[in-house]
Image (cartoon, coloured by chain):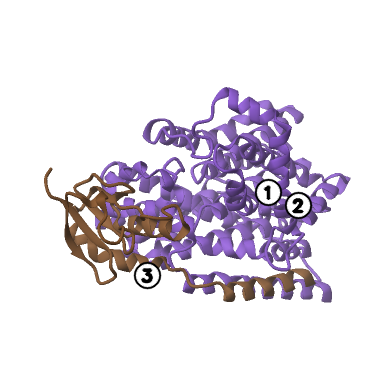
Chain colours: A purple, B brown
């Protein structure tokens, strides 16, 4: 298990130093958000390296583990040396601290959040003890594919002949699990459980870091995010919905525009768009819904660069997303060219009929409405309508403008899910009942981030702890 | 914040009330069949003679697949090797297994059959 932990840490730490070496900063220069982004990029990059090793027939085995560990350690060392050299060349820059005086209310909010997170951590532990193989989809889809990768190596493609195991979903989660097993030398159930919990931690870190952990609202956001059973349940699930949520919210955190002045700084624009593109691309490498996110966030980026009259900046976002999009395209069009089961067999005439049928709309709304009201689990009923209403109302205020882009992307994704429900060729009741909770979780962290973005001006608030190029 | 605390407490309580998942048990029941099956490739799986689409029948089939990776466990007969899960064959003789010979039966009741002629 120690080796599995090392497998998680190595690419994350390497990614942290690469971000520093390349002077890629996150909005607000939050260390917490930077750690979340480094963790997300580390997991994503490691999955791509593993995929290359599998394709080359070099997975698993000690040779893979040695080469993989060497790669991340080498990258870490090079990035660290580059950072040191640049820091010396730039000279020591003073770090300016920000004096904060916490009120009793501040302390109470933080204490309550810590208690909440502790309680939420208990849920995955309890669920792991009862379901060590994870929820149904975990062992029927994600961990099963990981077993194919781990046990069969390059012959893992045999799994594509199992239609109920969703062969068309991309491989980030399964590759990550198989990689942890390769490091551990055995198929430990704790490895996917640990990875699943880490996705939950990174999600919380991304939301709180984006909202500035120095402010009470970040702690409120963390509390609201983890309170519903649905969140902690999916942190225990070992499935791919929380990973998608994590990539979605980290990508959107890069695109938040708290401080309009940030968009006039080329370095910050480059960082924000490049990282947002890469993280969005990783969401598409995680699950089909990530493709929808790439399309939605692409619309947001296009609108933002046009609005600021700097359309050429979009190249940075494309530069981040393109390699991942190419990988997903290769996977879905060449390697596993199968349609998702929920739209398989759909015809053009049938699609038009379902899109325009008032009865179909009524059926979808009739099924979704009660689940929309009750989403979240015990005593969290109503959290989704309240969260959506709060995000919408706050985004309509001048001080809530930072959440508008995030909310627009969330709205586009929810609209996409609605269309998928309209078009599905599967039994609609079953489709909605088995997917609504998970689909909403994919946007829940972003929704919470949008709802609590009111009055948050990262650029101005963070000014005292100014970003020091190359020395942070 | 108060709501969040209460909801988190309810989440812990709900987690404690969840029943244990039977997948691990099912997996351990199918693992002894592995040595009697080819190491890779497709093997058949006899669907339950009644309520083949029920949750329990589906779970058992999926668990067999999960346990026996990298083999592909297809829900049909016709392959050289066929897995017959406990209580899935029709009592008193199942015509779907005509031409197959019992290879082994695990203590759990799950069996492997092999076709007599190619």
- Left or right: B2 as drawn, with respect to B74: right
- Left or right: B28 as drawn, with respect to A362: left
Give how far apart the Cα atoms at labels 1 and 2 are. Answer: 7 Å
Q: In the displayed structure, would residue A111 be above or below residue A24? A: below
Q: Residue A416, located in which quarter of the rendered image? A: top right
Total marks shown come to 3
Q: Which of B117 and B27 is in front in this view?
A: B117
Q: In the displayed structure, would residue A28 be above or below residue A213? A: above
Give the residue number, with chain letter if any, for mark 2: A458
The residue positioned 57% from the left and 23% from the top of the image is A348
Q: Circle 1 marks a residue in which chain?
A: A
Q: Are marks 2 and 3 in contact (CB under 8 Å)?
A: no
Q: Residue B25 carries which label?
A: 3
The residue positioned 72% from the left and 31% from the top of the image is A303
Residue projecting furthest to the top: A349
Residue A27 coordinates in the image, percent (x, y)? 68, 49
Give how far apart the Cα atoms at labels 2 and 3 are. Answer: 51 Å
Q: Are marks 1 and 2 in contact (CB under 8 Å)?
A: yes
Give the residue number, with chain letter if any, for mark 1: A27
The answer to whether marks 1 and 2 sit on the same chain is yes
Residue A233 coordinates in the image, percent (x, y)? 58, 64
Give how far apart the Cα atoms at labels 3 and 1 are. Answer: 48 Å
Mark 3, other Cα within 10 Å: few <14 / some 14–19 / many ≥20: few
The answer to whether marks 2 and 3 sit on the same chain is no
Q: Circle 3 marks a residue in which chain?
A: B
Q: Would you say residue A73 is visible in this rendering?
A: no
Q: Residue A292, located in which quarter of the rendered image? A: top right
Q: In the displayed structure, would residue A430 be above or below residue A195? A: above
Q: Would you say residue A355 is visible in this rendering?
A: yes
Q: Which of B113 and A140 is in front in this view?
A: B113
Q: Nearer the viewer, residue B64 or A79?
A: B64
Which quadrant does the C terminus of chain A fall into? bottom right
């Amino acid at each position: 298990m120690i080796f599995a932990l090392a497998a998680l840490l190595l690419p994350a730490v390497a990614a942290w130093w690469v971000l520093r070496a390349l002077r890629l900063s996150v909005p607000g220069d939050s260390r917490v958000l930077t750690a979340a982004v480094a963790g997300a990029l580390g997991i994503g990059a490691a999955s791509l390296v593993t995929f290359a090793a599998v394709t080359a027939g070099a997975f698993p085995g000690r040779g893979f583990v040695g080469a993989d560990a060497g790669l991340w350690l080498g990258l870490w060392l090079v990035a660290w040396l580059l950072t040191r050299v640049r820091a010396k060349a730039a000279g020591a820059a003073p770090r300016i601290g920000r004096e904060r005086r916490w009120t009793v209310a501040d302390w109470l909010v933080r204490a309550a959040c810590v208690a909440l997170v502790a309680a939420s951590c208990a849920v995955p532990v309890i669920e792991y003890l009862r379901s060590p193989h994870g929820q149904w989809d975990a062992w029927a889809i994600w961990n099963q594919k990981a077993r194919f990768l781990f046990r069969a190596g390059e012959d893992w493609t045999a799994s594509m002949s199992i239609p109920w195991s969703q062969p068309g979903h991309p491989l980030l989660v399964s590759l990550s699990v198989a990689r942890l097993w390769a490091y551990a030398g055995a198929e430990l159930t704790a490895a996917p459980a640990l990875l699943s919990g880490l996705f939950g931690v990174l999600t919380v870190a991304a939301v709180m870091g984006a909202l500035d952990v120095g402010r009470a609202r970040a702690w409120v956001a963390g509390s609201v995010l983890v309170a519903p059973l649905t969140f902690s349940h999916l942190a225990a699930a070992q499935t791919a919905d929380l990973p998608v949520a994590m990539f979605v919210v980290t990508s959107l955190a890069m695109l938040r525009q708290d401080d309009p002045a940030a968009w006039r700084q080329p370095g910050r624009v480059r960082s924000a768009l490049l990282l947002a593109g890469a993280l969005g691309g990783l969401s598409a490498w995680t699950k089909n819904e990530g493709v929808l996110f790439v399309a939605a966030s692409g619309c947001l980026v296009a609108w933002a660069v046009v609005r600021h009259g700097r359309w050429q900046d979009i190249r940075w976002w494309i530069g981040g997303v393109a390699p991942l999009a190419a990988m997903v395209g290769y996977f879905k069009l060449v390697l596993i060219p199968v349609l998702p089961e929920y739209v398989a067999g759909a015809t053009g005439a049938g699609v038009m009929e379902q899109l325009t049928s008032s009865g179909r709309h009524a059926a979808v709304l009739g099924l979704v409405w009660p689940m929309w009201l009750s989403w979240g689990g015990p005593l969290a009923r109503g959290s989704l309508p309240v969260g959506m209403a709060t995000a919408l109302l706050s985004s309509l205020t001048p001080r809530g403008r930072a959440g508008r882009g995030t909310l627009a992307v969330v709205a586009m994704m929810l609209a996409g899910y609605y269309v998928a429900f309209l078009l599905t060729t599967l039994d609609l009741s079953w489709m909605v009942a088995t997917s609504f909770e998970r689909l909403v979780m994919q946007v829940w962290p972003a929704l919470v981030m949008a709802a609590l973005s009111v009055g948050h001006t990262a650029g101005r608030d963070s000014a005292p702890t100014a970003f020091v190029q190359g020395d942070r | 914040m108060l709501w969040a605390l209460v909801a988190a407490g309810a989440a812990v309580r709900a987690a404690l009330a969840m029943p244990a998942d039977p997948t691990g048990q099912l997996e351990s029941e199918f693992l002894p069949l592995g040595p009697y099956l080819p190491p890779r490739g497709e093997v058949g799986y006899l669907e339950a003679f009644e309520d083949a689409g029920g949750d329990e029948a589906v779970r058992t089939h999926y668990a067999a697949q999960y346990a026996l990776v990298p083999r592909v466990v297809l829900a049909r007969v016709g392959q050289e090797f066929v897995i017959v899960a406990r209580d899935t064959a029709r009592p008193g003789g199942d015509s779907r297994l005509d031409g197959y010979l019992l290879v082994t039966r695990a203590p759990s009741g799950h069996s492997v059959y092999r076709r007599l002629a190619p």
